[in-house]
Amino acid sequence: MRSTRKSALLCLTLAATLVAFGHERADAASRQHVVVEIRTQPGTTAFATVTLPNGRPTALAVRQTLPDGARIDVPLRVTVVIASTDAKSTTTLRPDTSFTLIETGAGERASMAHGSALFSVVHGTLSFFQIKYGRAFTASARGTVFSVEGSGRNVTFACKRGIVDVGYAARLQIEGARRPGRTAGSKSSATSAGAAASDRPHVVRAVDVITPARTPSVSFAADAPSYVKTFRTAGEAQALYDAQLIVARQSGDPERLAAAFNNRGTLYDDKGDYDRAIEMFNEAIRLNPRDAVTFYNRANSYYNKNDYVRSIADDDEAIRLDPTFADAYNDRGDSYDNLGNPQRAIADYDEAIRLNPSDADFYYNRGIANGHRREYDRAIADYGTALRLDPQMIDAYFNRGLLYGGKGDPDRAIADFNLALRFDPAMSDAYANRGLAYSAKNDLDRAIDDYTQSLRLDPSVAAVYANRGLAYSAKDDRARAVADYDTAVRLTPSFAYPYVVRGLNFLYAGPLSRARADFEKAASLAPANAYAALLVELADRRSHAPSRLPEAAKRLDMNAWPAPIVRLFLGQSSSAATLAAARDPNPATERLQVCLANYYTAEYDLLQGAKAEATRFFGLAAHDCPELLQREPARAGLRSLGAQP
């Protein structure tokens, strides 16, 4: 920044210029700007240019009148001085500055893409005076002398006289508060809760008030601001923003008033009062329909109301107003993913990453969408990048652990759940899913310990009781197994999974009537689930009851797995064809499908009286199935035939 002495001299020059133009009065509605002076250093051949709306750049001339929308580009070693036609303001554009006049009337608005400038505003003559710098900053004044100077990657606002409000976008943070995020989803045999995504941040309009006596200047990073406006409590934020709203109403400045409504809207949204938040954002948009931030915030409120279509529309508008708004692309991706369009979501995440490749949240969310597309390796890679950028992103460890578990890699899954628990020892889902990984390794004692710890933290999750019951069953502790299954059914009587695992226990240990009742209940709760229909078929055939599978098959997707197993029991296929249909290009998918084909082929052969073949297929399933849920019934089938698992 230039020395204080030189800046002071320039202020005096501007004062003289104001006097010179003080007699040229004009009606407020027709106010314009006039070029007062163009100073060129000796030896300079470059010249300043002006670009009118929808026009081409032309040379700027002294005494030229500039309408709203005119952009002035000042080259190196050239200075341009502009005054309003009625001398209410004067602007000095320093070398290497790009400046655009936005509005001239009861007040003035202008913007600077880059560079440095000095402004002088006659006190009390304008309703408002605002200078926007880049995407993030707005300086507002009513009678003052101040400068804006870009230097490298920084921008500095300095007040010479009066008061200047420097407004900028900031993320709202209430200490200790965490907003609900998206869910990645979890395995159906694990817990019903997923991993919460990174916070969807509110953007508030923060204000730094600068005066010569108290805070003569403030500096910011000009290229990619990511400021955080932190409050100890929501009440502290509410008090500040209520006071800002009063001042904004007194000012008569519509943009300042819009910013105040925007800020209050973020607080209502933070408290979960989404309708009231939307009312605040609506008013802010009415006052200032050019602010991408408010559309972005309203999109968040619609998102939180599960109104993803309106959320997308608002993110669309935020992006139209600010094509570099990376968070808006990211959040629009969230909405598309929740609408079942992960491909479109990934396109948005790709753009967000292109605009800001250092934001871990964007990779995390793309990882979720890739998981929904079953692109598990890409999802794992995205979580890995997110963790390199933010090694404490607990949910990324958790979600990557889920994917490793799904790929049949329990050791890596356990490693990720260990890391998640190191950062959050109270994460019940991590214990529950680590228990699944230990079960997959047949480390049953550790699995039971993890399920027990998960239930100590959250005793309401039925699937964890069901999974612990499976582990007890594998340890031949039938009493504890049945007790856990009973608790799971009691907690969520409309959840099919506990009926399935309890029914499998009764299928081999008796009584068969209870197995049949449990499978019937599971099938009634999940009529489109082929496995539930197959289990009913097993119980019916063992009970010598008429088959209900032909009728159930009408409700099933017979073009997808496990349709080949259904056809086997319908008499439309063979064991060899069923096993051939289980092959899949994805190794993890193939392992699971071959496992299930072996188990159900064993049951089919047993019903046909082919005990030797049943024993062989039960043995394959007990040895090769990736999870305890499939292995334990196969082991029980072997025991029922007098064979050792």
Image (cartoon, rainbow, N blue to C red):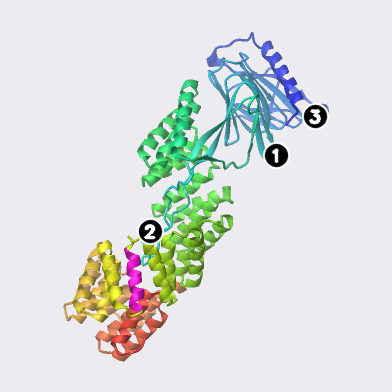
C-alpha distance separating marks 3 and 2: 68 Å
Residue occupying the point 46% across, 74% down? 587
Instruction: Determine which of the numbered discs, if any, sits on residue 44 in the image.
Output: 3
Which numbered disc, 3 or 2, marks the residue that appears first in the sequence? 3
Which residues lie in the magenta part?
462-474
Nearest to the observer: residue 529 or residue 487: 487
Depth check, mark 3 against mark 2: the one in front is 2
Whether residue 462 is situated above or below residue 171 in the rendered picture: below
* Spot occupied by residue 270 in the image (x, y as percentages of width and height): 42, 41
Whether residue 462 is situated above or below residue 638 in the rendered picture: above
Quadrant of the rendering where the N terminus is positioned: top right
Crowd tier of the residue under label 2, counting other residues whose Cα lies within 10 Å: few below 14, some 14–19, many 20 or above: some
Q: Are marks 3 and 2 in contact (CB under 8 Å)?
A: no
Name the image quarter holding residue 212: top right
Instruction: Determine which of the numbered discs, if any, sits on residue 152 in the image.
Output: 1
Tell whether 623 sits left or right of 121. Answer: left
**Dot 2 lies on which element?**
loop
Give the labeled residue for mark 2.
193
C-alpha distance separating marks 1 and 3: 23 Å
* Spot occupied by residue 500 in the image (x, y as percentages of width and height): 28, 71
Residue occupying the point 25% across, 81% down? 509
Majority secondary structure of magenta residues: helix
